[in-house]
Image (cartoon, coloured by chain):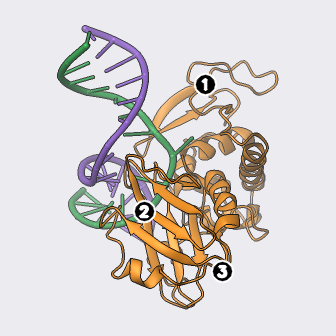
Chain colours: A orange, B purple, C green
Amino acid sequence: MPELPEVEMVRRHLAPVMERRRFEDVILRRRDLREAFPRKFRERLIGQTAVSVDRRAKYLLVPLSSGETLLMHLGMSGDFRTGTGGSLRHDHVVFRMSSGAIVTFNDPRRFGLMDLVPAGGLATHPAISVLGPEPLSPDFDGDALARACRGRRMPLKVALLDQRIVAGLGNIYASEALHVAGLSPTRRASTIATGSGLPRPAAHRLAAAIKQVLERAIARAARENYRASRFRVYDREAEPCRRARCTGVIRRRTQAGRSTFYCPVCQR
DNA sequence: ATTGAGACCTGTCGGC
DNA sequence: TGCCGACAGGTCTCAA
């Protein structure tokens, strides 16, 4: 379930039950997820206080009282729930906080990740150091996007999935943003970048579309408290394009092994 | 250096 | 009903 908006919702869910609370117990039901847990994970965590619950792209970051950081990624199927004591299939990690709250990580496919990063080591952590700009931050704009796409021969959709170009989009919102911007997913990424000096309007449109799509997804989820299911193009193959006055029909194709949904009429 | 294919793992869904 | 393949919101590694 997790692209940037979903991870942000998880962050907001965890913050009130974890912030300024101590880890009283940590239960690992397996020795690995995508990777092995770091050595002494449990011992190093117990007794520490969570300073805050932050997010960088699709990563959750929990700075600890020691200066270390608990780094977590939800992978494809990871999720957290709080409060319920019960144990379900695929519950892999349980945190018992000093508030009494039970925080459980459930992840059927186990593509998730947990790591404990030494003080000062975040910026050089292999998962974090390679990340491109945070799409909702002011330093991500058309210019930054154009720069990142310069010389890239890969399809635009594939570029949006590359976390080094912009960090936080996944397969759904990459398709959605391209539809908002009216750009074809198959264009070479370089074609939105600066051709002869000035960044092209397409880069600015796309950067704005990315922000809009992510912000609306977060706002919607916060409002409705269950996941929004109405997308513009994602999972709508053969259905009519939702753009006003567009007569197109949504198509699906595979790019870099992932499904892309787009309108061949209004995305150029 | 960049790009694409395959790998990782489990669950669900549609077709026969 | 059961079996089988295709597919799923992510990322890593490897080889061209």
Q: Are marks 2 and 3 on the same chain?
A: yes
Amino acid found under the numbered disc labelled 1? Ile
Residue assigned mark 1: A250
First in sequence: mark 2 vs mark 3: 3
Q: CA distance from mark 2 to mark 3?
A: 20 Å
Q: Is residue A61 visible?
A: yes
Height in image: A258 above or below A81? above
First in sequence: mark 1 vs mark 2: 2
Residue A11: image quadrant is bottom right
Local crowd size for mark 3, using a 10 Å CA cut-off: few (<14), some (14–19), many (≥20)? some
Local crowd size for mark 2, using a 10 Å CA cut-off: few (<14), some (14–19), many (≥20)? some
Residue A150: image quadrant is bottom right
Amino acid found under the numbered disc labelled 3? Val
Q: What is the chain identity of the residue bearing mark 2? A: A
Numbered label attached to residue A51: 3
Q: How many marks?
A: 3
Q: What is the chain identity of the residue bearing mark 3? A: A
Where is residue C2? Give x, y as percent: 20, 18
Asked whether A254 or A129 is in front, the reply is A129
Query: Helix, strand, or loop for circle 3?
Result: loop
Asked whether A116 or A195 is in front, the reply is A116
Where is residue A141? Give x, y as percent: 76, 63
Local crowd size for mark 1, using a 10 Å CA cut-off: few (<14), some (14–19), many (≥20)? many
Residue assigned mark 2: A93
Q: CA distance from mark 3 to mark 1?
A: 46 Å
Q: Are marks 1 and 2 on the same chain?
A: yes
Q: Are marks 2 and 3 in contact (CB under 8 Å)?
A: no
The residue depicted at 67 percent of the width and 57 percent of the height is: A13
The residue depicted at 40 percent of the width and 83 percent of the height is: A43
Height in image: A40 above or below A153? below
